[in-house]
Image (cartoon, rainbow, N blue to C red):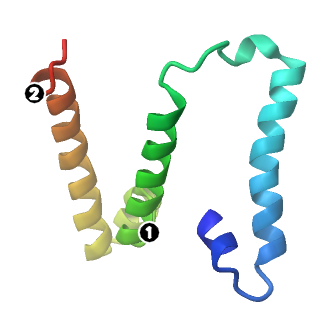
Amino acid sequence: MLAGLVRPQPGETAGRVFFVAGLVGGGVVLAFLVPAALPVAPAIPLGPSIAAGLLVGLGARMAGGCTSGHGVCGVGRLSVRSLVATGLFMVLGMATVWVVRHGAGGR
């Protein structure tokens, strides 16, 4: 959605703006109506959170879709591209957990 706002295509901008505004607005409304639903302080500092979000977006762009799209829709269609992408997501996710817990001074 955000990439489409950076490089807008004719006729797609309004929908993307409303989608992003709805995400932000929904969080604001939730914080106002049910403040206890959101933590007082984030568990992870803002900088790494932003970096992680950008990396996820970059990965989804490079993979031609998000993990859910490949895993649910693509695998269900027996798409070779989605089967490979989902396998890579799983292996790299497991490797990341191992590095964080064991290889990078983890618990």
Left or right, 1 with reference to 98: right
Residue 76 in percent (x, y) is at 39, 64
Q: Secondary structure at mark 2?
A: helix
Q: Nearer the viewer, residue 3 or 30?
A: 3
Q: Nearer the viewer, residue 58 or 81?
A: 58
Which residue type carries mark 2?
Gly
| Vertical comparison of 97 with 90: above or below | above
Residue receiving disc 2: 103
Quadrant of residue 93 in the image?
A: top left
- Foreground mark, 2 or 1? 2
Residue receiving disc 1: 61
Quadrant of residue 2 in the image?
A: bottom right
Left or right, 88 with reference to 39: left
Residue 37 in percent (x, y) is at 72, 16
Q: Secondary structure at mark 1?
A: helix
| Residue occupying image coordinates x 50% and y 26% | 45
| Vertical comparison of 34 with 66: above or below | above
| Residue occupying image coordinates x 82% and y 27% | 30
| Marking on residue 13 | none
Can you name the residue that lies furthest to the left here?
A: 103
Q: Is residue 83 visible?
A: yes
